Amino acid sequence: MRRLCRIGAAIVFALAGVTAGSSAGSAKTFTFLTESLPPFNHGEQENVKGPSRAIVDAVCQRLDADCRFELLPKKRMMHRARNGEADGLFSLGRNAERKEWMYFSKPLLQTEYGFFVRAGDDMAYERPADLAGYRVVTYGPSNMAKALRTLVETERPGVAGVTIDTNLRLSFRKLVGGRYGDQAAVFSNRDVGRHHLRHDNITGVRYAGAQRRLTYHVGFPKKAVSRDFVQRFDAALTALREQGRVAEILAEHDMEAAQLAR
């Protein structure tokens, strides 16, 4: 009987050790991916910088969560996310297709889409009809390109054509050089466009006006993250906003905080 008790105790002790070891090694590391989209996100590989990364990092610290960040080409980023190989993507705009396979956080920040034209062009964008006769260029594939296509197809402003370019920085240089014709406009995120103009010392371009305001979020693949975690993430983000921390981060980059409501 004593022998059986000793054996039973040994088994219980061994199982307890396995359970404890499993618990200690099961702390999840959350992987957040992003693409190079300065000034919002930039850097190299795992050395990700920018206001969006800073805000997400602050949320992770508040949640006492172990988070790592990685910068990848957009196609690779999306592929990994769709396969459940990432826990979050930023900075993303929301659309119907993405909502099918991702949860979205409350907004990290606020920005806008708008049109850039050559300095000598006096066009001031207020409505789609102002684009009549213009060739409009944008970066794609992207949510921005989808927004432009929707604008052109639904409003029918009479544009001369739409060009989807894979390099937004070169698009601004081509605009200045007249490569798109005498009447041309680049459709871009305002803050991204201004960053490229400053960073590349491109002159002769001005911002002609906003087409619409938008917010950027963290997208959480449903294959990898529970709705409960997204709710906890949102609660921590809201708390940081109310404390003024989000506004502090964005002020360092001359950017706007989004409204608390989704």
Image: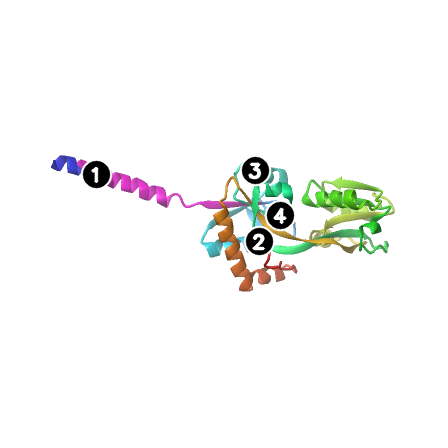
Left/right placement of residue 99 relative to residue 140 reads left
Q: Secondary structure at mark 4?
A: strand
The image's colouring method is rainbow
Q: Amino acid at mark 2?
A: Lys
Q: Secondary structure at mark 2?
A: loop
Q: Are marks 2 and 1 in contact (CB under 8 Å)?
A: no
Q: Could you say which quadrant of the image residue 112 lies in?
A: bottom right
Q: Nearer the viewer, mark 3 or mark 2?
A: 2
N-term mark: 3 or 2: 3
Q: Which residue is mark 2?
A: 106
Residue 157 in the image: x percent, y percent?
83, 46
Mark 4 crowd level (few <14, some 14–19, many ≥20, 10 Å Cα): many
Relative vertical location of residue 161 with respect to residue 193 in this rendering, above or below:
above
- Say the numbered circle drawn on residue 211: none
Q: Amino acid at mark 4?
A: Leu
N-term mark: 2 or 1: 1
Q: Which residues are magenta?
A: 7-33
Measure how far apart labels 3 and 2 are at the Cα level: 21 Å
